[in-house]
Structures are given as structure tokens and as C-alpha cells.
Amino acid sequence: MPFKLARSSFLQVFTPPQMAVYAMHGIFSDGDAKAFRNRCLIQEDKFERLLSSLPFKFVSLDDAIAGRGEALTMDDATNAAYRAAKLAREHGHAVTVFVNPYFVRFQRPYFFLELNWLLDRTSCSSIQFEGTTFPLNFLSERKAFRIQVKDRFCMLASIEEIESTIGDIGARLGVERDGLPGHLRTMTELELRMLVEAGVGIQNHGFSHTHPKALRWVQLMREITLAQEWIRDVCGQESRHFAVPFGDALPQWRLPKERGLNWFTLHDQVRHGALGPGIWNRLRVESLLEGLNEPRRCDT
Ligand SMILES: [Zn+2]
């Protein structure tokens, strides 16, 4: 039987335990906070002030879902996440990084970060994409184009198709794909092992960051299994926690019990905490920055 995602009635019958798991994508230290390349990232000094001023320490993901505290997580295996995770450990906090083995293993940049980098540098006033002309004169227009491309990425199951789409966009925008800023580059296996040594938990963000709606359920389970195996081999850690790529999808079918898998979303329209057996919604760490009177929100 398919696990029917009747979200409203499902939430009414499930009484969740209190917990909070925070999510972020890393930190940056230079440049314009409004630039696409710094999108969804937090300024290093603000993050450090948050870490040092919190009246509690973050706990591990296992402890958080058992109701023993609040956890901090980072998505994507970038240097921005690496630096943020190291900083958290230096301040005595537990932290978990959700990684995608494909990008680490093949040392490829994350495609949506390449897109951000292209958008920061182009001087084109418009672009043709899938039969539509998108103006690019203002930040709002570039954001609208970015959302369109991101929606397209979510429908693509093949990393080759995504790579070719990004190559095509780069050519149309008249900018090279190289020269990605250091904080957006993908971690190496060595850096990942250094995080493990520093006490960082490494968990599963899917093998190739493919959106679940582009995959059949069996393909998604394969993505999760491949990542679990890679994390076991490279990091020596058993990963039972899966942060769904793009953050917005709930499982279409009941999670296989024998795998003991926990599924984490990052969805602004759904309450945080436990949504169902093994399903948890995270909060953006930006909500804690509001306590420091320094809000910085990620808009999509
Ligand atoms: Zn991600």
C-alpha cells in the first residue's frame, strides 16, 4: 500500500515529541551578503557570535530526536559547510553534515552553486531558457530565472542532463564555469575525514542530490543505500539519517522499518519537529539569529 501523504489529517492524529533540529548550509567571510554566491549562507562572524552566545550546546542528531536537546545540521559537502562545522566543534557544539558522495568522489561542484556563480558574473540583460525569455537586469529578475532553473533541476534524474543544462546556461550567459569561489567548492575526502576526526557526524543527503520527484521510490532507496555505503567506507560511520535534497519532499511510501531510517525535511510551510514515525522537519538556523537581532533569511 502506498504511504498516503494526506498531510493535514496525518498531522492531526500524530502527537509529536518536542524537539528542534536546525539546518544551515555554511558560512562565508567575504563579499556582498546579497550576492547569489552567498545565498543561504551566514556571515562567519555572526555565526561565531551565535555559537558563543547560546545558553545551551547543540547535541547530536540521535540525542535530539530522543528529546535530549537541540541539534545543528549542515546540508551539502561544501567548504562553507566544512568551515561552519569546524567552528561549531571549536565552540563545543555537536554538529552533523549531510553530504552527497557523488560531488565529493568526483570532485564536482554542486550544480546550483555553479548557477549562483554564473548569475553573479553575467552581464547579459536576458536569457532564453526552454522557450521563454527571462530578463536579467534586476536582482528580482535573476531570482525569478534562478527559481525556474532550479525547478527544472528538480525534474532531472540524470546528473549528465543537469551538467549539460548548466553548461548550456553558462554559454548563453557568456561566462566561464571555472573559478568557483573557495567557499562554494566541494570538500575533498581528506577534509571529510578531518571533520570525522573533529567529532562531526556525517550523514546522508542522497548520492547525487537528485530530487525525489524525479525518481521512482526504488531509485530513491538506491540513492540512499549508495550514499550509506560510501559514508561507511570513507568516513567509517553508519548513517541512518537522511536529509532529503531540496528539503521539501516527504516520503511517498512508508519508510522501510528494517532500515531504521530517519527522514529530515527543511520545509518552511510545515511546523518543525516530528511529522510522523521517522519523519522530522528542521528549522532554519536563521531563526536563532533573530534572537541576536541579526535576521538573515533564505528566501527559497
Ligand atoms: Zn542540499
Image (cartoon, rainbow, N blue to C red):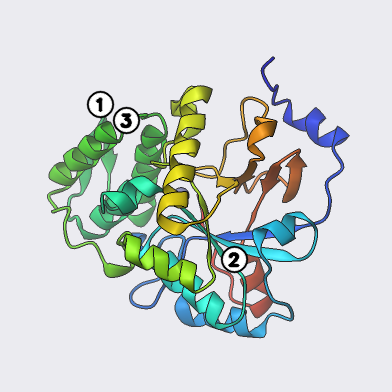
Look at label 1 and name its amino acid: Gly
The residue drawn where x is 32% and y is 59% is 186
Element assignment for label 1: loop
Residue under label 2: 286
Q: Which element type, helix, strand or loop, lies under badge 2? A: helix
Q: Nearer the viewer, mark 2 or mark 3?
A: 3
> Which residue in the structure is indicated by mark 1?
131
Q: Which amino acid does the dot numbered 3 rest on?
A: Ser
Relative vertical location of residue 140 with respect to residue 171 in this rendering, above or below: below
Quadrant into which the N terminus falls: top right
Considering only order in the chain, which callout, 1 or 3, is on the residue closer to the N terminus?
Answer: 1
Q: Position of residue 111 (x, y in %)?
A: 31, 47
Where does label 3 land, which residue? 158
Please indicate, yes or no, whether residue 83 appears anywhere in the rendered image. yes
Residue 94 place in picture, x, y as percent: 62, 70
Proximity of marks 2 and 3: CB atoms separated by less than 8 Å? no
| Residue 70, x across and y down, in percent | 72, 65
Cα–Cα gap, marks 1 and 2: 37 Å
User: Image height check: is 190 above or below 238?
Assistant: below
Q: Which of these two is toward me, 145 or 3?
A: 3
